[in-house]
Image (cartoon, helix red, strand yellow):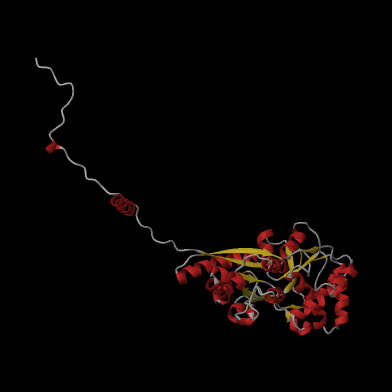
Amino acid sequence: MQNEPLFCQHPPRSQVKIQPRYTLRTLAALAIVTSLTSVAPTAPQAQTTTLLNVSYDVAREFYKDYNAAFVEHYKSTTGKEIKIDQSHAGSSAQARAVNDGLAADVVTMNTTTDVDFLANNGVVAKDWATLFPDNASPTTSTMLLLVRKGNPKGIKDWNDLIEPGVKVIVVNPKTGGNGRMAYLAAWGQVRKAGGTDAQAQEYVTKLFKNVPILAKGGRDATSIFLQRNIGDVLITFESEVVSVNREFGEGKVDVIYPSSSIVTENPVAIVERVVAKKGSREQAKAYLDYLYSDAGQEIAARHAIRPRTPTVLARHQDVFKPIKLFTVADYFGSLTEAQTVHFNDGGQFDKIYTTGK
């Protein structure tokens, strides 16, 4: 038997398959082709713009509903997504926060002095009040008196607030527009009834002697009144009645419409330095424009914020009871003048409240 070979012989050279040799350049090219064909291309993702609305304390529920409606409206009219964030506190505190760097795209305040403050510091346009209709105030409100259910102290009008033993809750006029408008309403109602400024000062001095604690903002005032159970009457915006009923339940308060009260405007403005940096001016303007639409005005009315559009206002006369209204201009010249005379350091409020305490 013939022995088997100890190792396999190489096949003839003609049967060997020669592997091709690739240069480094060719290999690199093949790697690129492979990478391009093995990963499916992706379409660019549309960026969602986010706006921040910095607003006053008692408007949070209104803007929660308004923001949802605007997001839907913006998507249906532009095909683009948008997100709205909101921030709420005392109006003046919010204005200072924006001035100090809080990156709001828009501000929606309850007194023009807070927007003027931002304009004077170059945060919003100097002519902000001319950039939207109605002095850039798409809605208004007024100051009412909220008492405990059953009105145990028998509060009927402003004069009842200075009676001995009546405790009044009000926002600090130095920190919130709610407080400034309450103060001006109390002063102005004396003038509306034919009184002098001296008589108005006497009345307001007596009123603040009955104020046991100054709230930081409108919602803080409501919490003091209803959660801490301090005070017999709360002076606040008409719109807060709806918020009280929603948050604390129907039947907690009675609403007193005084013989007269003040018209309060809710001014809005674009924050120029932020939208210029973000490129969000178009979206910010659309957001504020929608406040003037019938849809935006209807949402305001449902929150007891007075719409500017006469037809919308007429549809909600069950909410907005008849009341004699006066304006800031009637007795104070302007809110800027009122700020200087009454609320700046050393002004009438400081004198009155120091005396009262």
Q: Is residue 191 above or below residue 221?
A: below
Where in the figure is residue 51, as x and y percent of width and height?
Answer: 57, 66
- The reply to whether residue 230 is visible in this rendering is yes
Q: Residue at x 83, y 80 (%)?
A: 190
Residue 13 location, quadrant:
top left
Image: 142 above or below 211: below
Location of residue 200 (image quadrant): bottom right
Quadrant, the N terminus? top left
Residue 188 rendering spot, x and y as whole percentages: 79, 79
Tell me if residue 28 comes above or below residue 160 in the rendering: above
Q: Quadrant of the C terminus?
A: bottom right
Left or right, residue 6 beside residue 321 = left
Q: Residue at x 64, y 81 (%)?
A: 127
Residue closest to the eye, 39 or 160:
39
Residue at image location 74% in from the left, 83% down from the top: 329
Residue 71, image x, y percentages: 52, 66
Which residue occupies the foreground of this view, 166 or 150?
A: 166
